[in-house]
């Protein structure tokens, strides 16, 4: 399904605990919706949010395409289920083949062990790859904000994207846009001097 834009939290089950609240006067675009039972991999196919009125269409399209390319490199977590295909190895009726009981037990243990290692191994690979791609999207968001003259705050939000997550929690990936620069980009006045500008405060 095509991801959508939220201006308020989801109203379904445990999704209310997710950071799906759009910033004041801004917009939130979901790359990966935690409301999906089996979340697909992230995607970014949105029209320019109304909050970005001063941003040219070409600038937005360039940003949208760059983020979309990064999203296409994610791997769906559904792939982890491939490890379950090894489980039948432990369920094969080895006894019917006339094998000794001890051998049958070893084959079953090995089958389940391989399935478990496949599940864990795939999970580690998919999560690690996702976190590297998250860093790339953050860089694109920072570059986009700079190209807009820092007139807007562009925040890339992620939640429950690591190896350890609460029970039933699903990954959230979203980009929030709001007018004005981020607090880290605003000059700080200390002892009559604007830090970062090197000029006396008036």
Image (tube, rainbow, N blue to C red):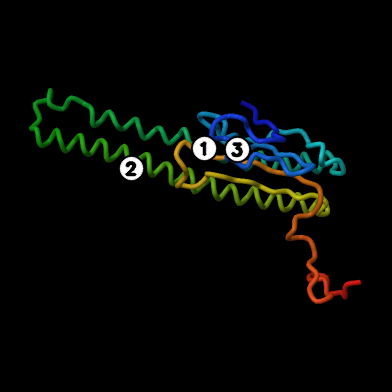
Question: Which residue sits furthest right?
Answer: 202
Q: Which residue is mark 2?
A: 117
Horizontal side of residue 6 vs 193, given as left or right: left
State the separation of the CA atoms marked 1 and 3: 19 Å
Instruction: Give the percent coordinates (x, y) of residue 53.
Output: 86, 40
- Give the position of the C terminus as an image quadrant: bottom right
Q: Foreground mark, 1 or 2?
A: 1
Q: Which residue is mark 1?
A: 170
Q: Foreground mark, 2 or 3?
A: 2
Report the front residue among 78 and 14.
14
Q: Foreground mark, 1 or 3?
A: 1
Report the front residue among 36 and 12.
12
Horizontal side of residue 22 vs 57, given as left or right: left
Instruction: Give the percent coordinates (x, y) of residue 32.
Output: 60, 36
Q: Tag 2 or tag 1, which sits nearer the N-term?
A: 2
- Which dot marks residue 72? 3
Crowd tier of the residue under label 1, counting other residues whose Cα lies within 10 Å: few below 14, some 14–19, many 20 or above: many
Q: Residue at x 14, y 33 (%)?
A: 104
- Give the position of the N terminus as an image quadrant: top right
Residue 92 vs 72, above or below: the answer is: above
Q: Residue at x 43, y 42 (%)?
A: 123
Report the front residue among 40 and 85.
40
Residue 7 vs 201, above or below: the answer is: above
Q: Decide: marks 2, 3 in contact (CB < 8 A)?
A: no
Instruction: Give the percent coordinates (x, y) of residue 57.
Output: 83, 38
State the separation of the CA atoms marked 1 and 2: 22 Å
Instruction: Give the percent coordinates (x, y) of residue 138.
Output: 65, 50
Crowd tier of the residue under label 2, counting other residues whose Cα lies within 10 Å: few below 14, some 14–19, many 20 or above: few
**Image quadrant assignment for residue 176:** top right
Q: Residue at x 64, y 47 (%)?
A: 137
State the separation of the CA atoms marked 2 and 3: 26 Å
């Amino acid at each position: 399904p095509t991801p959508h834009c939220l201006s308020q939290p989801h109203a379904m089950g445990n999704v209310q605990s997710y950071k799906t609240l759009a910033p004041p006067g801004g917009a939130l675009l979901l790359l990966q919706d935690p409301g999906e039972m089996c979340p697909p991999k992230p995607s970014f196919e949105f029209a320019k949010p109304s909050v970005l009125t001063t941003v040219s269409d070409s600038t937005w399209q360039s940003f949208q395409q760059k983020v979309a390319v990064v999203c296409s490199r994610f791997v769906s977590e559904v792939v982890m289920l491939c490890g379950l295909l090894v489980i039948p190895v432990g369920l094969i009726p080895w006894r019917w083949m006339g094998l000794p009981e001890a051998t049958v037990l070893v084959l079953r243990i090995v089958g389940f062990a391989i399935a478990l290692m496949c599940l864990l191994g795939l999970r580690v690979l998919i999560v690690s790859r996702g976190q590297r791609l998250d860093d790339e999207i953050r860089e694109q968001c920072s570059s986009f904000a700079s190209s807009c003259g820092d007139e807007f705050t562009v925040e890339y939000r992620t939640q429950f994207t690591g190896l350890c997550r609460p029970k039933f929690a699903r990954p959230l990936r979203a980009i929030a846009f709001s007018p004005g620069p981020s607090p880290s980009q605003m000059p700080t006045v200390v002892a009559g001097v604007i830090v970062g500008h090197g000029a006396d405060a008036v």
